[in-house]
Amino acid sequence: MLPQPRQKIRHFIDISDLSRDSARWIIEAGKAYRSDFIKKRQEKFLEGRTIALLLEKPATRTRMHFELVGRDLGAEVLIFPMQDMMTSRGETIADTARVLSRHIDFLMYRAETHEKLLDLARNSTVPVINGMSNKSHPFRTMTEVMTFEQVQGSIQGRKVVLFGDCSQNTLNSWIHAAAIFDCRVVACGPESLEYRPDAGFLAWAKEHAADVSYDSDPKRAIKGADLVVTDTWAPVAKAGLEERLSDLAPYQVNEDLLAEASDEVLFVHPLPAHRGREVTAGVIDGSRSITWAGGIENKRFILPAILKWADMAI
């Protein structure tokens, strides 16, 4: 008998796809998993299951966490560098989804484009998890929300400020988080359109009454901030890097800028970081930084929550 498709499939593609209840469930389940890690990992609720990682972009932390969590939960993890797959020879991502989802229980895709990620999800009969695309990185933002709340309590009503290139996927996922978690998000970068938020995401924010704004003045933007976020200024090799770094230099998160916020402000960098560019060593390695818990440790705890949430639709 041929395998029967699931009645309903839950993909984890964007935070905007989650209901408020689902998003809150994932955050709280991640906290619970961390607080009782030794007991929780003994449950091995994915025993005998398989997770495939489709890596179209380099991955250090994402690959590490999926492999660790797979072992924690009893699942086998298969690694598929996309340059070694038939997609590199012309096979469509849709056909790849049809093949893999007949044998694999979860697909994680670290995709060059969001469109390819959506195409994979449309043609998969198992849950697809967004490991990063050019448009969003929800797994990372959810981890940062969880980490903030462990230190400062609920993120509802709090002010999150993102500095630097506001056209990147980091801000896009935080725009979604603004609506789902009811927090305030301020993007702060140069006036140039090249660095401004994606118009489609801003339109989505307006449609969903999300508190999202743009400010080109760093000292004004950081006033009252509860959480400060930045990201690498050169995510890929780009022509004109020197000009780009010059444009973004006023938006470096350093000790002087952080001093303009409250004494309780927290800082997070999703990594990889370039000290001396987007952030100083004194900030990322300082007492207000939750980078290492938010960018490293908590991914191991929120990922089981995401997998459990996706699996509950079986």
Image (cartoon, rainbow, N blue to C red):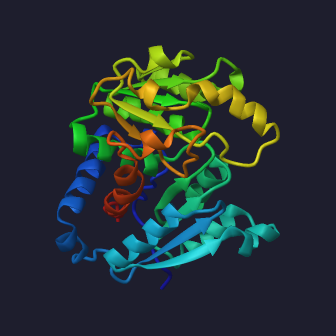
Q: How many marks?
A: 0
Residue 94 appears left or right of 35: right
Seen at 55% across and 45% down, the residue is 275
Where residue 251 appears, x then y in whole percent? 57, 27
Residue 70 appears left or right of 230: left
Where residue 129 appears, x then y in whole percent? 48, 58
Where residue 141 appears, x then y in whole percent? 43, 44
Q: Nearer the viewer, residue 305 or 38?
A: 38
Q: Nearer the viewer, residue 192 or 157?
A: 192
The picture quadrant where one finds residue 82 is bottom right
Instruction: Report whether residue 23 is seen.
Output: no
Relative vertical location of residue 164 with respect to residue 237 in this rendering, above or below = above
Relative vertical location of residue 287 with respect to residue 127 in this rendering, above or below = above
Residue 244 appears left or right of 224: right
Relative vertical location of residue 121 with respect to residue 208 in this rendering, above or below = below
Seen at 46% across and 14% down, the residue is 220
Where the C terminus falls, by quadrant? bottom left
Q: Nearer the viewer, residue 46 or 216?
A: 216
Q: Nearer the viewer, residue 295 or 198?
A: 295
Where residue 230 appears, x then y in whole percent? 51, 37
The picture quadrant where one finds residue 309 is bottom left
